Amino acid sequence: MSAQFTGAAPGEWSECGGLDSAKAPNKISGAKAGDVGWRFVDGGPPLRSVLPLGINTRMSKLPPDTIAMRREIWVALIAFVLGFVVVLASLSWLIVRFVTPEARWCDVLHTSINAILISVVFGGLGFAALSVWAISRYHYRHGFYRCRFCDRPLKGVAIFCDCPGAKALRK
């Protein structure tokens, strides 16, 4: 169908790079004039790679603040699990190493439950809060979050824009 125009046989992915309908006929099914990206020759869906942590792909139609928010959620979840496991493993080693073998079973159970609670609070929540704070600073410094009135990049979480629309909202 479009093999002579794109160089791809039907049933393969083919690159369409800013085709102008006035210059050449656009034989890639589903593509419009001016489309840039990858299309399936037989009219299938556009190639969209899903990368971890909401990383912006070439064909993503999501705004940057949505991508940043999704990335922060993924980082928080991964940091929570990682922090919980690291702190629980450390406390488990301490329990095995320093709780005497002569201790009663209820003392070992009490120490283990305390280790789990400490792992959730200090390990999971602490690592998640620290990682979200770091990635949030990165997103604000690189302009992912913008003012909805003037589209200027915001400087921080509680720092408002100086445009008239944001000032009127604060009053």
Image: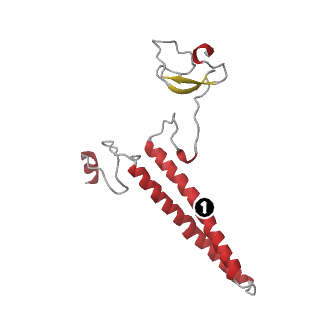
Find residue 88 and report its horizontal and vertical position in percent. 64, 70
At a point 44% along the width and 43% down the height, the residue shown is 64
The secondary element bearing badge 1 is classed as: helix
Closest to the observer, 142 or 117: 142
Label 1 Cα neighbours within 10 Å, binned few <14 / some 14-19 / many ≥20: some
In the foreground, 155 or 65: 155
Q: In the rendered image of this protein, does residue 64 appear above or below residue 1?
A: below
Image height of 44 relative to 131, above or below = above
Q: Which residue is mark 1?
A: 82
Question: Residue 148: percent from the left, percent from the top?
Answer: 34, 44
Q: Amino acid at mark 1?
A: Leu
Q: Which residue appears at 55% of the width and 52% of the height?
A: 74
x then y, percent, for residue 93: 68, 74
Q: Name the image quarter holding residue 87.
A: bottom right
Quarter of the picture containing the C terminus is bottom left
- Residue beneath the point at 53% across and 61% down: 128
Q: Is residue 39 left or right of residue 155?
A: right
Q: Residue 2: image x %, image y %?
A: 61, 15
Q: Is residue 56 above or below residue 120?
A: above
